[in-house]
Image (spheres, rainbow, N blue to C red):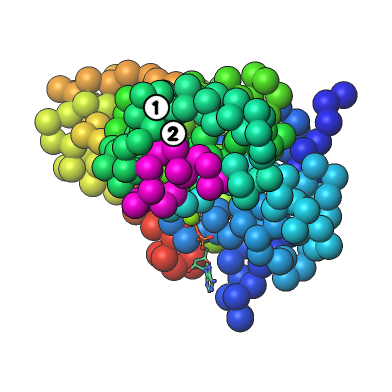
Amino acid sequence: MSKIAVETRELTKKFGDFTAVDHITMSIEEGAVYGFLGPNGSGKSTTIRMLCGLLAPTSGAGLVLGMDLAREGRKIKNQVGYMSQKFSLYPEMTVLENLELYSGLYGLRGVQKEQRIEQMLVLAGLQGREDEQTRLLSGGWRQRLALGCAILHRPRILFLDEPTSGVDPRARRLFWDIIYDLAADGTTVMVTTHFMDEAEHCDRVAFIYFGALIADDTPAKLKKLIPGKLFEVESENGFELLGRLQRGEAGSIIDSYFFGKKLHLLVEKESSIENEEIFRGAVVNEIAPSMEDVFTYLVKKESGKELGGGRISGTGEARLNINAVASKEG
Ligand SMILES: Nc1ncnc2c1ncn2[C@@H]1O[C@H](COP(=O)(O)OP(=O)(O)O)[C@@H](O)[C@H]1O
Ligand SMILES: [Mg+2]
């Protein structure tokens, strides 16, 4: 049986009367890449900061690498790797100076320090650029340097808080290659993101919504939560078609929403919609659900919003656009 790197029970954080993290119970296996997804303000950073020993929980319990969140925060902080949402690099310092500073914080010395810095320069692709000022690096380089700084001490677990926001797609791919390499070497990685395509890369994905965990499983199993079949519809009159669907002009439709320029229709399992009159002139294809379809479905279900209402819609741009400030009562 695999070992557990993180385990929480009813982990909760309140700020005054406001519950930012609401009784989260989860576990992460050692060596897994665990994706933590949710809209802005849903409690991702607060959860991560508790797991890193930076913020004391209000109630509930948790173990990180066997250490107790409530009592051993300082020990946890020194042993985990953490890359915060705002990469904590010193912009006025050079690449090498940043790496040296973090080596010092982790207590690395002598040959070991030299070796680790060299390895991190290779990992970040920054060999030969040691003397460049950090603020002059582009987003992707800064991101990889920040990662290098976060893992200088070879942490067994790494917490990444939206590491890929604000970097271009190529840099994002490069970054994920590094994450896979680390996981293959046995490092446990917990990563928050609002990029749905990145969720597909995770061994396991948890959805957090208004501070609560609303799903937690492998991407393949999460996709099976969607009832029925999913169709993609390309039509010149998308808006009009969506309006008619939402007024119930076609049978057996569970939900319909925009996904980029196309429509996605969730249809009861036994039925077929291709021959319905309403779709004449449109291109209709059955498709496999993406993680964004899963999330759209789960959020509507969770918030009690009527399916079919289409008030929460996918963007088709593989990015969460569901706004957590929208009232939960809807
Ligand atoms: N120190 C704090 N004091 C008060 N409210 C906070 C504090 N930190 C976070 N919050 C609130 O908690 C909620 C969750 O925030 P956060 O964990 O940063 O969400 P996410 O990372 O998912 O965007 C937000 O509504 C945020 O405003
Ligand atoms: Mg955050």
Q: Quadrant of residue 261?
A: top left
**Viewer-proximal residue among 299 and 309:** 299
> Which span is picked out in magenta?
89-102
Q: Is residue 295 visible?
A: no
Q: How many marks?
A: 2
Quarter of the rendering occupied by the N terminus: top right
To which residue does mark 2 refer?
A: 144
Q: Nearer the viewer, residue 105 or 143?
A: 105
Q: Amino acid at mark 1?
A: Leu
In whole angstroms, how far apart are the C-alphas of marks 2 and 1?
9 Å
Furthest residue in direction left, as rendered: 236
Left or right of 177 on screen, residue 20 = right
Q: Residue at 59% across / 42% down in the picture?
A: 103
Q: Are marks 2 and 1 in contact (CB under 8 Å)?
A: yes
At x 66%, y 29%, the residue is 112
Disc 2 marks a residue whose amino acid type is Arg
Q: Is residue 43 visible?
A: yes
Q: Which residue is mark 1?
A: 126
Q: State yes or no: residue 237 in magenta.
A: no
